[in-house]
Image (tube, rainbow, N blue to C red):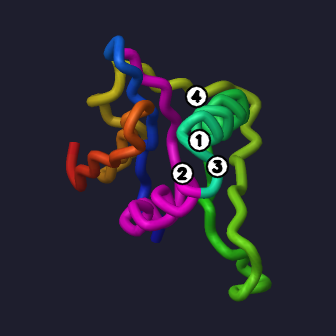
Amino acid sequence: MSTHAVIGVKYCDGTISGTYVHRDGDTMSPRIEGFVESNTTTGLQVLISAAQIRGGIRSFHCSPWDNPDGEPETEFLDNDETYVIDESSWGEDHLGATYSYLVDYETGKISANNSF
């Protein structure tokens, strides 16, 4: 069973750019911290933008299934439809997502919530 989530970046003007994450939504905080530490919040925004045009993320910054000791990677859904979450839709039900992670663009601080 998958634990769905949404991940987004919040800018100082209040706008949000986010996307849907299909797997492992309940364990994303440490992976987000590691990703931002290595790639910055700008890198996270680039990843989210790439995910939006592919329908979202299948798994975020995880070791590959066939190589548990491998370098973390992000796997996209590769759907035919885009899936964009913004400030007007952030609090909505996104395919049953029960976890949300909003990263402050300026500080990299994560606001995590386990129920919408």
In the image, taking residue 50 as reference, residue 61 lies left or right, namely left
Residue beneath the point at 71% across and 63% down: 73
Q: Earlier in the sequence, mark 4 or mark 3?
A: 3
Bin the neighbour count of mark 2 within 10 Å (Cα to Cα): few under 14, some 14-19, many 20 and up: some
Q: Which mark is residue 44?
A: 1
> Between 33 and 4, which is closer to the camera in this rendering?
33
Write the residue at 43% across / 20% down: 86
Marks 4 and 2, Cα distance to the nearest angstrom?
22 Å
Check if mark 1's residue and mark 3's residue have beta carbons within 8 Å: yes
Q: Foreground: 10 or 95?
A: 10
Q: Nearer the viewer, mark 1 or mark 3?
A: 3
Placement of the C terminus among the 4 image quadrants: top left
Q: Which residues are magenta?
A: 15-37
Cα distance between the residues tagged 2 and 3 = 5 Å
Going from the N terminus, do you reach mark 4 or mark 2 first?
2
Q: Earlier in the sequence, mark 1 or mark 3?
A: 3
Mark 1 or mark 2, whichever is nearer to me? 2
What residue type is disc 4 on? Tyr
Task: Give yes or no for contact between labels 4 and 3 (Cβ–Cβ under 8 Å).
Answer: no
Q: Label 2's element?
A: helix
Which is more foreground, mark 4 or mark 2? 2
Residue kind at label 3, given as amino acid type: Asn
Q: Which residue is mark 3?
A: 39
* Mark 1 or 2, nearer chain start: 2
In depth, the one of 80 and 17 nearer the eye is 17
From the top left corner, tell me how far across and down residue 99 is, in percent.
32, 52
Which residue in the protein does label 2 denote?
Answer: 36
Q: Residue at x 58, y 44 (%)?
A: 40
Badge 4 is on which residue? 83
Q: Position of residue 28 (x, y in %)?
A: 44, 62
Mark 3 packing: few (<14 Cα in 10 Å), some, or many (20+)? Answer: some
Would residue 4 be found to the left or right of residue 60 on screen?
A: left
